[in-house]
Image (cartoon, rainbow, N blue to C red):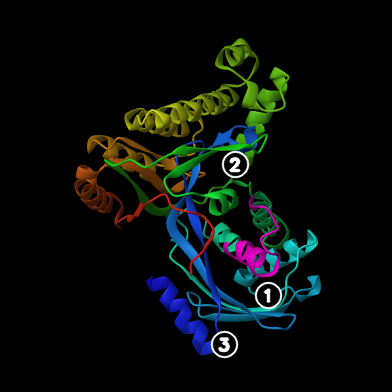
């Protein structure tokens, strides 16, 4: 409870009154990359890295907020013209505005927040921040009348309308809807979702953050999305969600090699996600790991969004006997997510740090993570 004590101490010093403590989680995505904009499935879970806030109404029309991690203070009203200049405060302002736009109630409040979601590691600290405040405002001022999926949409709309990021729904969805020992298969077309068990006794999840992000001259995500859209159009489909490999192979001579391999990855990734669902229901973590390695190969060879450092970490994982390993996120840097037998963890971490440092001149960051509850009241 170190995080709770830290924000409570700062809250008492600044505002000197009782308040309620809320938290929302960062997230991992076990499998299902670059599938969201193709109408496919993603497979996230909330993790034990959170943004936590202590909050109390202040009987005004102002929000007064202090960020412990940034050592910065902001104050703003609740009208559209009151948007704060600080980019971090716009996340909280945007959540307030999006609740109001939907007919919800937001009154002035005082808050102090902090987090232990690693920044820049692809664990969605911004979504955790939005989800924490959306959940808290719903509890404090709306008697929890806004359903949880709408809270996730509030976070997504905050990114779109106040932070300039045209993100999908997965990050906020996982932060709000996450449950301990459960992963969630989210259908990005229908928005239906289902929980699957993830509570392995003999395995753990370890993120290895390369701490590199390659700056690219072109727009790689837009180019890959355009490839997928061209193939779907040629097949007469809205998205690649309904495509199959036989269907893709039937038009192989009509499309470019690049478009073929982009579509091939997406189609095979859809099937891998479904295979992981069956494997988790059967407690078969070896199959889960095999699918993770296949996803990495596809992201590296077919979708071409890996980089030398991530391929190197994936090779080390395989050499160390790690059950499953792959890039997590959009690519070109960031993390690998690794499913590791507990007896192998120390050796794998030590080997990855040493060999990566020898080759690239710095150690990667290591984050063991546990699948936990999403947004919740801490008190």
Rounded to the nearest angstrom, the CA distance separating label 1 from label 2 is 29 Å
Q: Main secondary structure of the magenta part?
A: helix
Residue 127 in view (yes/no): yes
Q: Is residue 260 magenta?
A: no
Residue hosting label 2: 221
Give percent across and percent down for residue 46: 48, 51
In the rendered view, would you say 172 is above or below 87? above
Q: Nearer the viewer, mark 1 or mark 2?
A: 1
Crowding at dot 1, Cα within 10 Å, few <14 / some 14-19 / many 20+, comes out as few
Q: Which mark is residue 85?
A: 1
Crowding at dot 3, Cα within 10 Å, few <14 / some 14-19 / many 20+, comes out as some
Q: Nearer the viewer, mark 3 or mark 2?
A: 3
| Contact between labelled residues 1 and 3, with CB atoms less than 8 Å apart | no
Give percent across and percent down for residue 282: 38, 28
Q: Secondary structure at mark 1?
A: loop
Give percent across and percent down for residue 259: 60, 25
| Contact between labelled residues 2 and 1, with CB atoms less than 8 Å apart | no
Q: Is residue 138 magenta?
A: yes
Which mark sits nearer the N-terminus, 3 or 1? 3
> Observer-nearest residue: 213 or 114?
114
In the rendered view, would you say 3 is above or below 204? below
Residue 297 in view (yes/no): no
In the rendered view, would you say 55 is above or below 227? below
Residue hosting label 3: 15
Give percent across and percent down for residue 178: 51, 49
Q: Quadrant of residue 186?
A: top right
Residue at image x 77%, y 65%?
A: 100
Residue at image x 55%, y 28%?
A: 266
The magenta stretch is 132-148
Which mark sits nearer the N-terminus, 3 or 2? 3
Q: Secondary structure at mark 3?
A: helix
């Amino acid at each position: 409870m170190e995080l709770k004590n830290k924000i409570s101490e700062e809250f008492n010093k600044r505002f000197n009154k009782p308040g309620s403590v809320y938290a929302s989680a960062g997230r991992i995505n076990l499998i299902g990359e670059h599938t969201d904009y193709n109408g496919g499935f993603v497979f996230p879970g909330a993790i034990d890295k959170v943004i936590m806030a202590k909050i109390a109404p202040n009987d005004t029309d102002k929000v007064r907020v202090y960020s412990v991690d940034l050592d910065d203070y902001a104050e703003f009203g609740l009208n559209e013209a009151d948007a704060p200049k600080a980019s971090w405060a716009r996340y909280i302002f945007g959540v307030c505005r999006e609740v109001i736009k939907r007919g919800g109630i937001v009154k002035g409040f005082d808050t102090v927040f902090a987090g232990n979601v690693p920044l820049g590691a692809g664990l969605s600290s911004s979504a955790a921040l939005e989800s924490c405040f959306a959940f808290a405002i719903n509890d404090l001022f709306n008697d929890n009348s806004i359903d949880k999926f709408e809270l996730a949409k509030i976070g997504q709309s905050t990114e779109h309308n106040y932070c300039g990021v045209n993100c999908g729904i997965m990050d906020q969805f996982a932060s709000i809807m996450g449950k301990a020992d459960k992963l969630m298969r989210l259908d990005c077309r229908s928005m239906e979702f289902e929980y699957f068990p993830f509570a392995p006794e003999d395995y753990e999840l370890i993120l290895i953050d390369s701490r590199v992000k390659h700056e690219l001259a072109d727009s790689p995500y837009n180019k890959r999305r355009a490839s997928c859209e061209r193939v779907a159009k040629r097949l007469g489909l809205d998205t690649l969600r309904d495509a199959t490999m036989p269907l893709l192979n039937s038009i192989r001579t009509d499309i470019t090699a690049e478009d073929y391999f982009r579509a091939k990855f997406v189609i095979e990734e859809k099937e891998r996600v479904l295979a992981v669902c069956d494997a988790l229901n059967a407690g078969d973590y070896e199959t889960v790991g095999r699918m993770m390695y296949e996803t990495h190969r596809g992201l590296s060879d077919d979708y071409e969004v890996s980089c030398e450092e991530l391929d190197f970490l994936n090779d080390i994982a395989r050499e160390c006997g790690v059950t499953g390993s792959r890039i997590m996120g959009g690519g070109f840097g960031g993390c690998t997510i690794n499913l590791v037998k507990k007896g192998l963890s120390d050796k794998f971490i030590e080997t990855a740090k040493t060999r990566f440092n020898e080759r690239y001149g710095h150690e990667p960051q290591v984050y063991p993570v546990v699948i936990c509850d999403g947004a919740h009241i801490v008190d």
